[in-house]
Image (cartoon, rainbow, N blue to C red):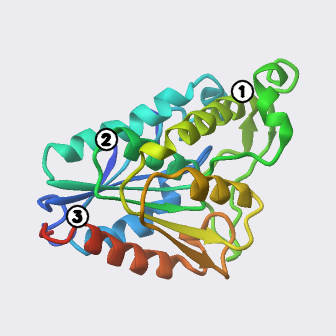
Amino acid sequence: MTSSAGPVAFSSDGFGESARIGVVMSHGFTGSPVSLLDWAQYLANQGYAVRLPLLDGHGTTWQELARTPWQRWYASYEASYQELEQSTEVIVAAGLSMGGTLALRLAALQPVAGVVVVNPGLTIADPRARYASVLKYFMKSVPAIANNIKKEGLDEGAYARTPVAAVGQLYRLFRETVERLPSVTAPTLVFRSSVDPVVPESSLEVLQQRIGSDVLDIVRLENSYHVATMDHDAQLIFERSAQFIQHVTAGTSA
């Protein structure tokens, strides 16, 4: 993969590409589309048009990510939304971790039928994150946050190191997205792992306090860690999200 790669498009038996319901998905910070491939394919098999972009700055080196502002991560995601907009009637935004942050930001800025997020990030537990823009001059990277999966033997294709400069960008993205949460009025489904060493519980608390939607459903995942889309509860995520998408797009045939 390269950072210039276009979005991955999924279809099943010719229906996905011609579907009138689109789903735009995003992987997480330092990660790759690998973490969502099975989920994306599952939704495509239900007849939805699915796009899963490789976010700018990802899929190359952590040094490249260190040079990539968060606005370009979001631009990669929004470009896939705009692509789907040309061929679908309604779109649902979805994402894992920081990808969930992007999905919420998209929902605040663009019309979507619903939002589905897995362990979305809005806060960072480490207080040093707010000083990352300064710390980056003294510390280039820290150990990876990758592969936080309870199920053994799986690899999400993330970077081996986390660039401190990018942590500063992540902190800014979170802060900006929290400010926009009242503008998110679409029905929202959140999957939240009971054990998640990466995204703190305060992220869910902030979402509950600030989101503008009247519909916020939370499904607890008892047998998965952070990358739940590859973990023991993956099938639950796939099935419940498909039911949710069907519900919020009722009246539009896939």
The image quarter in which residue 207 lies:
bottom right
Q: Between residue 33 and residue 47, name the one nearer to us.
A: 47
Q: Which residue is mark 1?
A: 165
Give left or right: position of 71 versus 231: left
Identity, as a three-letter code, of the amino acid under mark 3: Ser
**Residue shown at the point (88%, 21%) measured from the top left:** 138
Distance in Å between CA atoms under marks 1 and 2: 28 Å
Q: Is residue 54 visible?
A: no
Q: Secondary structure at mark 2?
A: loop
Circle 1/circle 2 CB separation < 8 Å: no
Find residue 55 and report its horizontal and vertical position in percent.
47, 39
Task: Locate the C terminus and report the quarter of the image it occupies.
Answer: bottom left
Q: Is residue 70 above or below residue 200?
A: above
**Residue shown at the point (67%, 77%) measured from the top left:** 151
The image quarter in which residue 249 lies:
bottom left
Distance in Å between CA atoms under marks 3 and 1: 37 Å
**Residue shown at the point (52%, 66%) measured from the top left:** 190
* Mark sitting earlier along the chain (3/1): 3
> Which numbered marker is on residue 11?
3
Q: Which residue is mark 2?
A: 110
